[in-house]
Amino acid sequence: MQDDRIDYINPAPEESANEESAPQTKRGKKSKKSLPGKIITGEIFEENKVRSHYPFALYCCVLIVAYIAYVFHYQHLQRTEIGVKIELQEERSRAMVFSSMRMNVSRHSNIISEIESRGLNLIESSTPPKIIDIAPQTATAATTLKTQSNE
């Protein structure tokens, strides 16, 4: 029994040549190949141990694809955000330019020079404007007027 085990671990030269030509030994068992050899030939996927993990491997592949899609989507959002920030900065600078132009045009001296350049016969008033204040009618006064008109 011990000799048989030793022969299986260290086969005789004639048996090793026989194993290379046929994948099965005398006992009907598959020959043991190294793990890299099984991966290269694809024999590792035929084993029942590996077959039972196919659903998990498929799940992992789906997660990887979902992660890649998430990364691409996030990068797209980042590029969009950067573009919007640049556009916002440009709009702010345009608003500052227009605001300064309005401030410059609305100055008193610029208004007078614009009136003269257009040839309008407008004269600046020397008296300040008067505020006309109209007091609102109170509710009691309005009701007394209605009662008097009804009688």
Image: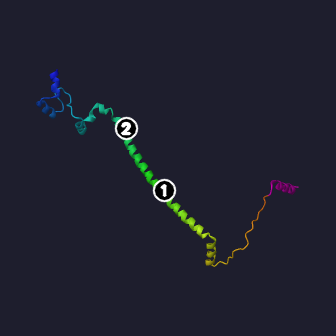
Please determine whether, in this image, residue 53 is positioned above or below residue 81: above
Instruction: Please tell me in which quadrant of the rendered image residue 47 appears.
Output: top left
Task: Label 2, secondary structure: give it.
Answer: helix
* Of pointers 2 and 1, the one earlier in the residue sequence: 2
Kindly identify the residue that appears in the image at 40 percent across and 47 percent down.
71
Residue 146 among magenta residues: yes
Observer-nearest of 108 and 65: 108
Task: Label 1, secondary structure: give it.
Answer: helix
83 with respect to 144 (left or right): left
Amino acid on which the number 1 mark rests in the picture:
Lys
Q: Which residue is mark 2?
A: 59
Please determine whether, in this image, residue 52 is positioned above or below residue 75: above
Q: CA distance from mark 2 to mark 1?
A: 39 Å
The quadrant the C terminus occupies is bottom right
Observer-nearest of 31 and 119: 119
90 with respect to 5 (left or right): right
The quadrant the N terminus occupies is top left
Query: Which of labels 2 and 1 is toward the front?
Result: 1
Amino acid on which the number 2 mark rests in the picture:
Tyr
Kindly identify the residue that appears in the image at 49 percent across and 59 percent down.
87
Residue 7 among magenta residues: no
Q: Which residue is mark 1?
A: 85
